[in-house]
Image (tube, rainbow, N blue to C red):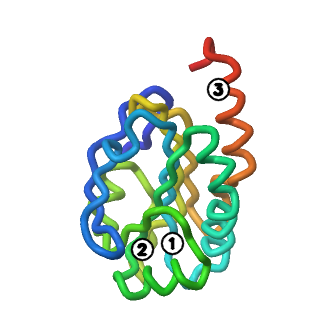
Amino acid sequence: MSRLAYGQPFPALDVPAVGGGTMSLPDDLAGSYGVILIYRGSWCPYCNAQLAAFSRALDTLSGLGVKVVAFSVDDEDTSAALIAKRRLRFPVGHSVDADKVAATVGAYVSEDPHYLQSTGFILAPDGTVRLAVYSSGAIGRLVADDVVGFIRYLTEHPEVR
């Protein structure tokens, strides 16, 4: 399992979406900066805080041309309850195969119970990785305010892209 690095294309990943359909990543984010949040599960207080913060920051992120998606191993009903509880305003996926996702993007996996550790990506409009944050435990993850600052920096300094 290798981790994704700066400039690497984000690999194709299809994720069942809460409410039906499929999120096709990175294609669904093409043409915009994208944030992909892999969270441990609805039971995780750190994940709840992260997802709620991104939902609160969504207007600012959208104004910068950023799309946000999130997913976990949680089933659809559990994911839908989390969306309602945290008032999430971005697409949320469910029921992913932890081992398949880990093999695809390099996320850490917890074995018992079996779930993905927090992993976050910022993608450029062309679907390449601009930042990858891999956590091996409960803490260490993308922060909404940091993402806002990072995207502002990238858009103000096109030579860095």
What type is the residue that disc 1 sits on?
A: Arg
Residue receiving disc 2: 115
State the SS at label 3. helix
Q: For the residues marked 1 and 3, what is the alpha-carbon distance in whole angstroms?
A: 29 Å
Q: Residues within 10 Å of mark 3 (few under 14, many from 20)?
A: some
Q: Nearer the viewer, residue 126 or 113?
A: 126
Q: Is residue 142 visible?
A: yes
Q: Where 146 falls versus 98 (above or below)? A: above
Among the 4 quarters of the image, the one containing residue 114 = bottom left
Among the 4 quarters of the image, the one containing residue 128 = top left
At x 73%, y 45%, the residue is 146
Q: Are marks 2 and 1 in contact (CB under 8 Å)?
A: yes
Residue receiving disc 3: 154
Please tell me which of labels 1 and 3 falls first in the chain.
Answer: 1
Marks 2 and 3: which is nearer the front?
3
At x 61%, y 16%, the residue is 158
The extreme top residue here reads 159
Residue receiving disc 1: 40
What type is the residue that disc 3 sits on?
A: Leu
16 vs 117, left or right, is left
Residue 74, which numbered label? none
State the SS at label 2. strand
Please tell me which of labels 2 and 3 falls first in the chain.
Answer: 2
Q: Is residue 1 visible?
A: no
What type is the residue that disc 2 sits on?
A: Tyr
Q: Where 36 falls versus 66 (above or below)? A: below
Please tell me which of labels 2 and 1 falls first in the chain.
Answer: 1
Among the 4 quarters of the image, the one containing residue 112 = bottom left
Q: For the residues marked 2 and 1, what is the alpha-carbon distance in whole angstroms?
A: 6 Å
154 vs 25, left or right, is right
